[in-house]
Amino acid sequence: MIRRKFLSSSLAASALAVAASQEGSSKQADAGTRNREYYELRSYHLVSGPQSKLCDTFFAEALIPALSRLGMKPIGVFELYLGPQTPTMYVLIPSTSLEALVTAELRLAEDEEYQKAGHAFLHAPATQPAYERMESSLMIAFEGHPNLTVPPATAQHGSRVFQLRTYESPSDADHVRKVKMFNSGEYAVFEKAGFWQVFYGDTLVGSRRPNLTYMLSFPDLSELNAKWKAFGSDPDWKKLSSSAEFSYEQIVSNITNLILNPRSYSQI
């Protein structure tokens, strides 16, 4: 337990240091991040069979209720529909507190209700593991989109599809410019194109940095191409993307594009 507390505290300190360095000083970081959420994005890699059902039961009956007790909501749970490494399930956890987010596992370890509800998942035998591997990234919301927005269809359990996009940049400076590009008018173009904008996150801890990840949503997959066509032909996008600040070199070197479907119990 002492080792786990040390590792969790170290992660929190590292994440805070990264956030502070990005803003230029600890005082500026405090002012710049005060109203911005933090996100943990998990991907659970599974094999076809009983793992999916075990994960569904764990997420719906143990993890989501326990995280809600810690003040973390809404929690999104999605299955990968189009993309590599299926089956994979994604879990999006938002928090207004970085410390609360990175110490959540320690607090869940002491939550008897969570431990009881999640016992089958948490104590799955080595011969029948609950999942193959889990990967995780820690992000801070963009300054221009500081809070997660739930699609309007969610409240009615309506039809909705999610697009999860990760942009890698060739350098830290290019990454900063790409984030600035979003904050300089790109959100408005997405809105005009008809996308529901869920979150925008700058990766603090994770693989293949520097990168950013954002999530869009729309009612049906059949609308995807039409919405992106409207986005690409928008005069404001053409003006923004051709400006000297953002077009003098390639500021995005790789894009990962996934299509996700929400699980029936997802809060997003």
Image (cartoon, helix red, strand yellow):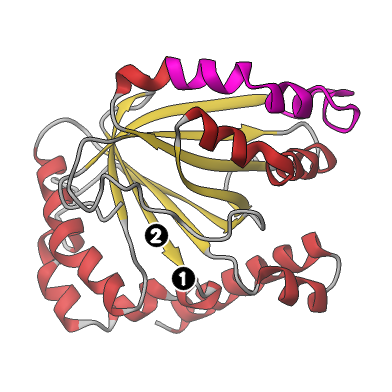
**Residue type for callout 2:** Ile
Q: Position of residue 254 (x, y in %)?
A: 64, 25
**Magenta extent:** 226-252
Residue occupied by mark 2: 93
Q: Is residue 192 left or right of residue 30?
A: left
Please tell me whether residue 150 is drawn above or below residue 16 in the rendered image: above
Q: Position of residue 9 (x, y in %)?
A: 56, 78
**Residue type for callout 1:** Leu
Residue occupied by mark 1: 101
What residue lies at 46% left-to-right and 41% top-to-bottom?
Answer: 215
Q: Is residue 138 left or right of residue 72?
A: right
Q: Position of residue 204 (x, y in %)?
A: 63, 56
Q: Position of residue 54 (x, y in %)?
A: 12, 49
Q: Is residue 7 left or right of residue 196?
A: right
224 in the magenta segment: no
Please tell me whether residue 124 is drawn above or below residue 28 in the rendered image: above
Please tell me whether residue 190 is drawn above or below residue 4 in the rendered image: above
Tag 2 and tag 1, C-beta contact below 8 Å: yes
